[in-house]
Amino acid sequence: MVTHFDMELQQMDMKTAFFHGYLDETIYMEQPEGYPDRVCLLQRSLYGLKQSPRQWNTRFNDFMKSHSYERSVYDSFVYIKKLQNGEYIDLLLYVDDILIASRDKRSIEDLKALLGSEFEMKYLGEAKKILGMEIERDRSKGTLSISQEGYLLKLLGNFSMDQSKPVGMPIGVHFKLRTATDEEVRVQYESMRSIPYQSAVGSLMYSMIGTRPDLAYSISLVCRFMSKPLKQH
């Protein structure tokens, strides 16, 4: 949409988002060691509370609706408002990361000021990177692309695979994996204990969801062996 309608795309970051949520319950918290032997009655949500994400989401949703923004019925993290000049402004929220898109520059500045008056915000200008994804835009050519090159290079380095040779396809359909026997698990236990198999698969899964759907088949295959992985997996 940003490319098709030649919209502005701005990014903001919410500072300490969960602190803005109001609590519905009465919650007491023990003070850290060294403080007086008392407890704290919480007035706001804190990081670590189970209800903090929902309370923050409720607070933000109520705020946006009070200023005539409608929540999308297709994606609950998208808010839309039709402006008086017939244009639209869209806000996308992911926990504390925000993207704002509109053809009307003035409305974007007004929304940024509105959010800043209610929450502690950090203004990041044109969107360049969000959720580990780099955003590259060429308005003269009318193109916008997203990539996770930096995330994946760091991932390869974390698992000592940054010097590996690339291949044309993630995995061949002829490549078969099978469930490990108890004897195989026992024999390879020591060598596999130091290999963070689940962490590697989960990290690759994040890139599959974001920008690399071509990894879907190979990741779905190795996901079947999370509990008892062997060297072949």
Image: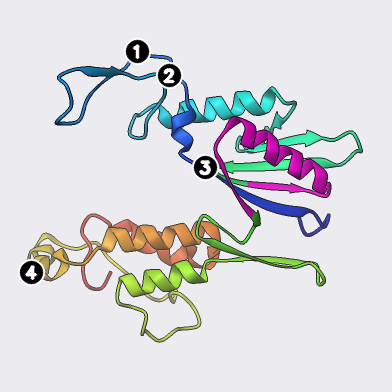
The colour scheme of the drawn protein is: rainbow
Badge 1: residue crowd in 10 Å (few <14, some 14–19, many ≥20): few
Q: Residue furthest top?
A: 26
The residues colored magenta run 99-124
Badge 4: residue crowd in 10 Å (few <14, some 14–19, many ≥20): few
What amino acid is at disc 3?
Asp
Residue 96 seen in the figure:
yes
Q: Is residue 94 left or right of residue 40?
A: right
Q: CA distance from mark 2 to mark 1?
A: 7 Å
Q: Nearer the viewer, residue 223 or 17?
A: 17
What residue is shown with label 2?
23
What amino acid is at disc 4?
Val
**Residue 147 highlighted magenta (yes or no):** no
User: Residue 119: where, in percent of width, then height?
Assistant: 57, 33
Question: Residue visible at 43% across and 19% down?
Answer: 23
Q: Nearer the viewer, mark 4 or mark 2?
A: 2
Q: CA distance from mark 3 to mark 2?
A: 18 Å
What residue is shown with label 3?
96
Q: Which mark is residue 187?
A: 4
Q: Secondary structure at mark 2?
A: loop
Q: CA distance from mark 4 to mark 2?
A: 52 Å
What residue is shown with label 1?
26
Q: Secondary structure at mark 1?
A: loop
User: Residue 65: where, in percent of width, then height?
Assistant: 68, 25
